[in-house]
Image: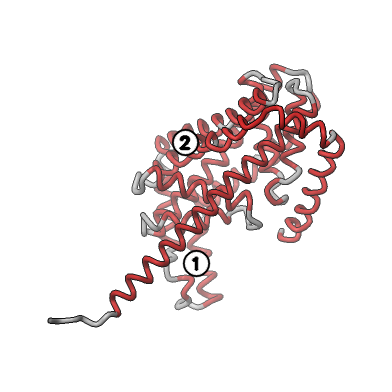
């Protein structure tokens, strides 16, 4: 899969450049410049979807950590997954490490993240289905709707099998046993791993249907609130759309991006999806591609701020730990 990502990056860049050149770089820049600094409001606006998502995570974590802290971790997780050349679960792995600053229990934190990811998969399908319904009721683009709907239907067995495997397959216990045979029981990487307990913690969370429903609703609200970005940006770009139109664009863009996981950051794929879907709801092509570029710029700005805050926090934590170590090593001074 790694080679696919290396192929996907240049292909995505080439696609993005081709789209801009085809639609006219000058016209696109003129549309964006006409909106002015009001587009910068998209950066703080993105805090809302992540706040709702972080609240869903806090429910799964039993509210063992404060919401502001989990929101910050959520911003870092998203930035790593969307901006850095890492595997699709890279943000989740780093997020587990950061969450353990406040909740040291590795199994509890890991179980909450695994279940959160499973809930997110369900939310993505539900949100995509909403987007299809909204597109179908407001346009007559049958071919595009059928293509996206077929892709969603064909990919549905994968998350279903994933949930079944994690719920009943004792996956993490098997991984732990395999790693122990490969590396040896005393290997440092296995120090904090208790696969059997992690499987049990995941199963305990998965059996709480009320909790899962609450997490689902909060995450769905987060996804839906992400459409505010599309709604506001198009209004500022001079081509306002209805709330249902903004929801449809956001929902199906997310679906296409997640389907193209082999392309780093969905580069080119996201822009093509936004262009196609915005045109379907009646936006002209120049404004549609301007919207795609504005959304990408917001993602980069917000993500870079999150990554910078992560590095600052890591440095501060390392210095604090170093100072504590020095204090312990100082000899006792008696008068």
In this picture, residue 287 sits left or right of residue 210:
right
Tell me the number on the disc at residue 283: none
- Tell me if mark 2 has few (under 14), some (14-19) or many (20+) residues whose alpha carbon lies within 10 angstroms of its own: many
- Tell me if mark 1 has few (under 14), some (14-19) or many (20+) residues whose alpha carbon lies within 10 angstroms of its own: some
For the residue pair 78 and 153, the one nearer the viewer reads as: 78
Q: Which residue is drawn at 60% across and 45% down?
A: 301
Is the Cβ of the residue at disc 2 closer than 8 Å to that at disc 1? no
- Residue highlighted by disc 2: 52
Tell me the number on the disc at residue 176: 1
Q: Which element type, helix, strand or loop, lies under badge 2?
A: helix
For the residue pair 20 and 101, the one nearer the viewer reads as: 20
Q: On screen, 208 above or below 88?
A: above
Cα–Cα span, label 2 and label 1: 33 Å
- Looking at the image, is mark 2 or mark 1 earlier in the sequence? 2
Residue 206 visible here: no
In this picture, residue 138 sits left or right of residue 167:
right
User: In terms of image quadrants, where is residue 271?
Assistant: top right
Disc 2 versus disc 1: nearer the observer:
2
Q: Residue furthest left?
A: 335
The x, y position of residue 157, in whole percent, is: 65, 42
In this picture, residue 72 sits left or right of residue 39:
left
The x, y position of residue 72, in whole percent, is: 46, 47
User: In terms of image quadrants, where is residue 34?
Assistant: top right
Q: Residue at x 60, y 35 (%)?
A: 40
Q: On screen, 240 above or below 88?
A: above
Residue 127 visible here: yes
Q: Residue at x 63, y 55 (%)?
A: 84
Quadrant of image for the C terminus:
bottom left
Quadrant of image for the N terminus:
bottom right
Q: On screen, 96 above or below 216?
A: below
The x, y position of residue 233, in whole percent, is: 64, 28
In this picture, residue 194 sits left or right of residue 247:
left
């Amino acid at each position: 899969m790694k080679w696919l990502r290396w192929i996907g990056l240049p292909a995505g860049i080439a696609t993005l450049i081709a789209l801009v050149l085809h639609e006219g770089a000058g016209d696109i820049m003129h549309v964006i410049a006409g909106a002015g600094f009001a587009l910068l409001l998209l950066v703080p606006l993105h805090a809302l979807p992540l706040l709702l998502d972080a609240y869903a995570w806090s429910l799964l974590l039993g509210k063992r950590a404060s919401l502001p802290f989990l929101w910050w971790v959520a911003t870092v997780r998203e930035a790593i997954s969307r901006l850095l050349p890492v595997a699709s679960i890279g943000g989740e792995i780093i997020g587990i490490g950061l969450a353990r600053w406040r909740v040291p229990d590795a199994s509890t934190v890991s179980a909450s993240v695994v279940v959160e990811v499973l809930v997110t998969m369900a939310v993505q399908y539900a949100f995509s289905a909403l987007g299809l319904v909204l597109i179908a009721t407001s346009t007559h683009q049958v071919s595009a709707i059928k293509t996206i709907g077929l892709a969603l239907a064909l990919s549905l067995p994968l998350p279903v099998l994933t949930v079944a495997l994690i719920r009943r397959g004792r996956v993490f216990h098997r991984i732990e046993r395999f790693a122990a045979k490969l590396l040896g029981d005393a290997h440092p990487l296995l120090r904090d791993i208790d696969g059997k307990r992690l499987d049990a913690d995941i199963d305990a969370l998965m059996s709480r249907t009320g909790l899962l429903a609450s997490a689902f609703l909060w995450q769905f609200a987060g996804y839906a609130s992400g459409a505010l970005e599309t709604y506001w940006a198009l209004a500022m770009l001079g081509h306002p759309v209805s709330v249902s139109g903004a929801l449809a664009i956001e929902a199906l863009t997310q679906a296409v991006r997640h389907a193209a996981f082999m392309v780093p950051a969905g580069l080119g794929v996201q822009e093509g999806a936004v262009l196609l879907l915005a045109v379907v709801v009646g936006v002209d092509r120049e404004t549609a591609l301007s919207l795609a570029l504005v959304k990408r710029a917001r993602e980069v700005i917000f993500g870079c701020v999150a990554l910078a805050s992560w590095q600052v926090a890591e440095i501060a934590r390392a210095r604090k730990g170093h100072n504590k170590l020095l204090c312990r090593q100082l000899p006792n001074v008696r008068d």
